[in-house]
Structure formats: structure tokens, C-alpha cells
Amino acid sequence: MKIITKVSGCLFFGIIVVYFLVVYARRKEATNNGFNRTIFKTIHDSPSITNLQVSSYYIIGLSEKVIYLGNHARSQQVLVLPYNGNKVDTSWLNIPDSTLFGWGAARIHKQGNIFYLAEGVTPNIISFPKLDTEGVLLQPGFNHFDIIIPLDSFFIFRMYDTSLRKNILARAQYGQQGTSNPALLQNQLDGVFSTDGMLLFDSATKRFIYVYYYRNELIAFDKELGNVIHGKTIDTVSVAQITMQTVKSENSIKFSSPPLKVNKYACTYNGLLFIYSGLRADNERGKIAFTSSPIDVYRINNLKYMGSFYIPKYEGRGIRDMAILNNRLVILKGNEIAVFNLHLKLLFNID
């Protein structure tokens, strides 16, 4: 009798849980966000997936034959793996022994065939024409940064301006003091969190793009921080939905609740901007709304929306990094790396 009672209790509890989950899902699905997506169908084939064992890797860049991954846990490490994931090689970026380097802030970048190891605390920028060689120290001047796009003769970066008390974008040639354009980033609630975002470079158009995390704004500009184009993502979140609190014991400001991240990740390729959106569209219902990650596509020359496609979630995991080269989309999800073959030429009419 006791066993029957326990089983009945567990069954009843399970039914209640399922009921509330269904109600929650329906209410969430019924909530409109004020925009629709134009969906491109059959844009990719089934992916090849490789387990990387750890989630500390990030995408440095892609080449015709291989993927280059950096490791947040080992700042000098470069993982080199082919698109089929069959063989993985490890390379290292070596710096001069006398270099004072802020390893905790370091990140590896790739532009063309050149690798750059950069950190904005000390600051340092080191270039590597080849892997497994000692790098060449480039002079960043006294330009401190938290985000950077290093190129052959100059770099574009984001820094915190203490006098303006906000994030600003700047440009500097190696060995020289940078020049900034404080008007590029517009703060709302504050000068840090509301202006946070991603700095990207598109080699096809030679333009830089800034994608805000917490609002629907895009900015494209040239290497002189001019010829600015302003655009918007298709959602309606024009004001960052963030709340903050001051922690006096730590002398810091933190989020008091999780912010609404509108644009989660982004990458560029051949004049196109790809954004992994954090918002569901009004015309997305049922399974697709909760089991897929939407990628919205914009043209960089005018920041106009073109359309969207979906990437399936695996075990509920969304995208945490992404890159595109030719017809391959590379995505990091948890410990795994997935490679999709895209049909970009057919859909977007690019060579």
C-alpha cells in the first residue's frame, strides 16, 4: 500500500510539473516582441561535430583547410584542426622572455595570414607571421584597450575614457598615441554596460562594425573612424534593458538582474554581417522557437536586413562563438565545434 501511495504521489507531482511547464511555454510563446523574420530555408546541410572536451576554446579564424582555435585557459595555445575534425594539432605563440605581459587579458587574433597576440592592460601587441615562432613586438603606444582589431600598420580599439566616463572607439598607428571618435558610441543608462558590444572587421568592404549587445543598434565605419553608417537590427529593443547596483564593499557596479542580451554573437564575411539573436520573432511558434538559434543576416554597406536562418540547438545549448569563410559556418556550442556547409551563393547571390 505504501509503495502504491508513493508511486501515485510521484506520478501526480510529475503531472503537475509538466502542466506548469506547458503553461509557461505557451505564455512565453504568446509574448510578442514586435518583429518578424524572413526565413531562408535549406541554407545548410547537417553539420560535422567534434567534441573538444573543454569549453575554454574560442575561434581565432579560419583558412581554406583548417580552423584555428584559441584557449582562454592557455593564452599562447593555438589548436589547429581540419574541417572534418579528424586530426588536431597544437601550436604555440612564443614571446620574448623579457616581455611584461598581462596573460589574463590576452586574446589571439588572425588577419590574413598573420596572427596577433594582444592584451590591453600592459598593453602589448605581438605579431606572428607563422605559428611556433617567436613573435615581433609591435608598439601599441600608451593605448590601453579591452577590445581590439589589429591590422598590419594600425589597430582599431575600444577604451574607457575616464574624463567622459564612457567607452569610446579609437584608432592608432603602432608606436603612436591614438585618436578617438567619442561620438561613435552613444551611452544610455551609463557609459559602460549600455555601450557594451562586439567590434568586428570585414575584409571585403574594409569596414569595421560595432554591434551593441543590449540594444538594436549597429554602426559601420572606415579605418579613420569616419564614413559612419547607422543601422538597426530587426528587433524593437532600442533602449538597453539593464539594471545595476553599486557594491560598496568591492567599489564596483554590477548587474542587479540578468540583462536582456539582444545580440549574442556576430561575425562577418564577404560584405555580410551575421548576428546570433537572443530574441524570438512574432512569427516563430512551436518547436522552432525553442530548439533553434536564429542567425540574422545584414548587408554591411547599408546595414539592411536580408533574412534569417536557423541553427539547431544541441542538448539545449546555443551558440557561444561563430565564424564564416566561403561556404562554411563554424560554431562553438559548449564543448563541441560544429561545421555547417552553407549555400550562401544560392541565397545571397555572392561569389
Image (spheres, rainbow, N blue to C red):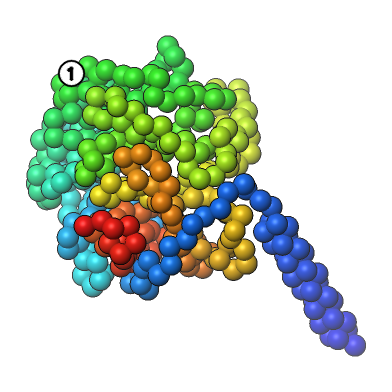
Q: Position of residue 164 (x, y in %)?
A: 44, 14
Report the front residue among 200 and 14: 200
Left or right, 75 with reference to 262: left
Q: Quadrant of residue 237?
A: top right
Q: Residue at x 62, y 32 (%)?
A: 243
Residue 333 shows in the view = yes
Vertical placement of 208 versus 311: above or below?
above
Q: Residue at x 43, y 36 (%)?
A: 231
Q: Position of residue 348 (x, y in %)?
A: 32, 57
The quadrant of the picture occupied by the N terminus is bottom right
Are there few (<14), some (14-19), or many (20+) residues within 10 Å of tag 1? some
Vertical placement of 196 versus 28: above or below?
above
Residue situated furthest right in the rendering: 1
Question: How many numbered tags mark residues here?
Answer: 1
Q: Position of residue 118 (x, y in %)?
A: 24, 36
Vertical placement of 195 versus 92: above or below?
above
Q: Residue at x 38, y 19 (%)?
A: 182
Vertical placement of 166 versus 22: above or below?
above
Residue 102 shows in the view = no
What amino acid is at disc 1?
Gln
The quadrant of the picture occupied by the C terminus is bottom left
Q: Quadrant of residue 145?
A: top left
Report the front residue among 47 and 116: 47
Q: Position of residue 225 (x, y in %)?
A: 29, 25
Residue situated furthest front in the rendering: 349
Q: Identify the residue position indicated by label 1 in the image.
A: 176
Left or right, 283 with reference to 273: right
Q: Secondary structure at mark 1?
A: loop
Q: Residue at x 51, y 30 (%)?
A: 194
